[in-house]
Image (spheres, helix red, strand yellow):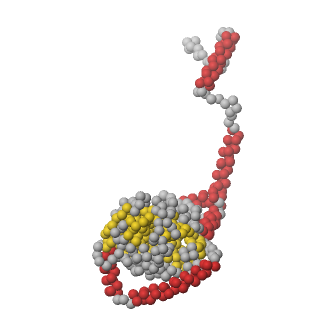
Amino acid sequence: MSDEEEPVAVPSGKTVHYGSLEAAEKARQADQAAGKDVIEEAKESGNINISDSGHFDLEAAEAESQAEVLEQFEKRKRARQIQVSTDDSEVKATLRQLGEPICLFGEGPAERRERLKQLLAVLGEDAVKQKKVAQQQETKKTDEENITWYHEGPASLKEARYCIAEFSIPRAKERVQKQKLEKMLPATQKTAKLQELQKRIRSITNDCSQIGDNRPLSYCSFSPNSQLLATASWSGLCKLWSIPDCQFIRNLRGHNCNVGAIVFHPQATVGLSDNACCMASCGHDGSVKLWNLISEEPVADIEGHAPYRVSRLAFDNSWRLWDLEAQEEVLHQEGHSKPVYDISFQKDGALALTGGLDAYGRVWDLRSGRCIMFLEGHLQPILSTDFSDDGFHTVTGSEDNTASIWDLRQRKRVYTIPAHTNLVSMVRFQPHHGNYLVTASYDGTAKVWANPNWAPMKTLAGHEGKVMGLDITQDLQYIATCSYDRTFKLWVSEMQGGL
C-alpha cells in the first residue's frame, strides 16, 4: 500500500452506542408504552379483534391434510383394482343404471371407462347391484298399489249378481244379433249413412243458451224421453229445465255444498212413475240424494261415502253398488290406489268401467265381481269414462288433455286422441250407434270426433269458461254443454235427420 492511497473504512459487525444507557432504556420503554396505547385504542374501536385463547393447531391441520392425501391414495388404489368392461356399450349401460350421464362433451371411450372406475371407487363395486335391488323394490311397491281388493259382500249381493246376469245375458244376445245384421249391410250403404251423418254433424249450431245458476254448473244430463234437462251447480242446487225451450221447471233443494253430478234413472219419464225414484245426485260432502219428478225435496238419502267427496256417484278409493228399491248397499268394491272419479255401465248391464285419479281404468264384471281388464296408458288422472253401444269399445278422458279409445276384445288401447289444450272433463259416445264421440274440456270447447278414424268433425265453441259437462239426448236431436261461466247451451244440427 503506497502512501498516496487513502485508507478504506471497513465496517465491523458491532454497533457502537454513544451516550447514557439509562436514557436509551427510558426511550425504548416509552416507545413500547405508546405502542400498547395504540393497540388498546384499536381494540376498543373494533378495528382489531384479538382472542385471548385463540390458537392454530398445526398438528391437527397436518393430520387432516395427511388424511385427505391418504383418502385420495386409497381411492386411486381402489379404482385400479376395479374391473370395468372394455365394451363401451356396457360402460354406457352401467352409467345409465347409476343415474349418471352416459356421455360428456368431448369424452371418448377411454375417458368414459375411467370416469366409471372413479364412480365405482366412490360408490362401491356393488353400487349397480344395490341400484337394481332398489328398482325392484320400487316396482314391487307399485305392483302392490295396483292389486285389486275384493270385499266380502252380504247375501243380497249374490242375489244381485244373479239378477244382473238374468238381465244382461238376453240384452247381450239382442245386441250381438243386431250387430250381425248390420254387418251384412252393403259397405256402400253404410258409407253413405256415415257421410250423411258427418254432414249433419258439421252443420251443428248453438240453438239456445241459458243462465243456469249464480255459481258454476258442474253437470248436466237429459231425461230418457229427451224432454227434460237436469243441471247441477256449485251452489248446492239442482234444477230441472224443459227441452227445447229451456224454461225453468223447479229447484231440487237438499245439498249444502257443491253438487258433483245428477243423473236420471234409465226408466224415468218413460216407464217409472213420477213419484218413484227418478234421479240421483251427489255432493262434495259425501251425500247421495234420490229425487222424484214432483217434489223439490229429496225422497231419500244414501249414506256410506262421507266424509269423502262423491264426484260421479262414486269416490273414496272405491265404488259402491246400491239397490235403489231396497235403498241399501250390496257391494263395496275396492281396486284403485287413489280415489275413483267416474263410473259408467255397459248398456247390457254386465260390465262397469271405473276411472281413477291414479291414472288407471278398470273394467269390472258385475256378475262375478272380478276386474277383467286393466286400462293403463294415461299420464294423468282419468276424469270421465263411457261405453259405446257396441258393448266392447270404451273411452276415457284424462287430465293429460287426451281421450283414449279401448277395445275390450283386443284388451288394449286402440287409439289416443290429442283432443284438447286443457284437461278433458267429459266424454260421451253417440247413443245407440257410437258413430261419433263428443269430448268437453277446460279449454272452453267441446269437440265431435268421427268413428272409426277419430278425425275432428266439429268444434262447439261459445262458452266463456271451462266446459264442465255434456250430454246427448236419446232421440239424437240435441247436445247439451254446461260451463264454469254458469250457463248451459243446447246444440242442434241445421240439417234434417238429427245427430
- For the point 69% across and 29% down, which residue is it? 52
x and y, in percent, of residue 356 in the image = 53, 68
Quarter of the image with the N terminus is top right
Visible residue check, residue 339: no
Q: Is residue 240 left or right of residue 158?
A: left
Q: State which quarter of the image contains the C terminus.
A: bottom left
Residue 229 placement, left or right of 51? left
Relative height, residue 143 to residue 184 (above, below): above
Q: Residue furthest top?
A: 19
* Residue lying at 69% horizontally and 38% vertically, measured from the top left: 58
Task: Tell me which residue sits at (65%, 18%) in the image.
Answer: 32
- Give percent across and percent down for residue 468: 43, 64
**Which residue is more in the foreground, 83 or 416?**
416
In depth, the one of 452 and 220 nearer the eye is: 220
Q: Is residue 25 visible?
A: yes
* Picture coordinates of residue 304, whole percent (x, y): 59, 67
Of the pair 370 and 105, the residue shown nearer to us: 370
The number of numbered badges drawn on the structure is 0
In depth, the one of 186 and 468 nearer the eye is 468
Image location (x, y in percent) of residue 25: 68, 14
Which residue is drawn at the image coordinates 46% and 87% (left, top)? 174
**Quadrant of the rendered structure where residue 192 is?**
bottom left
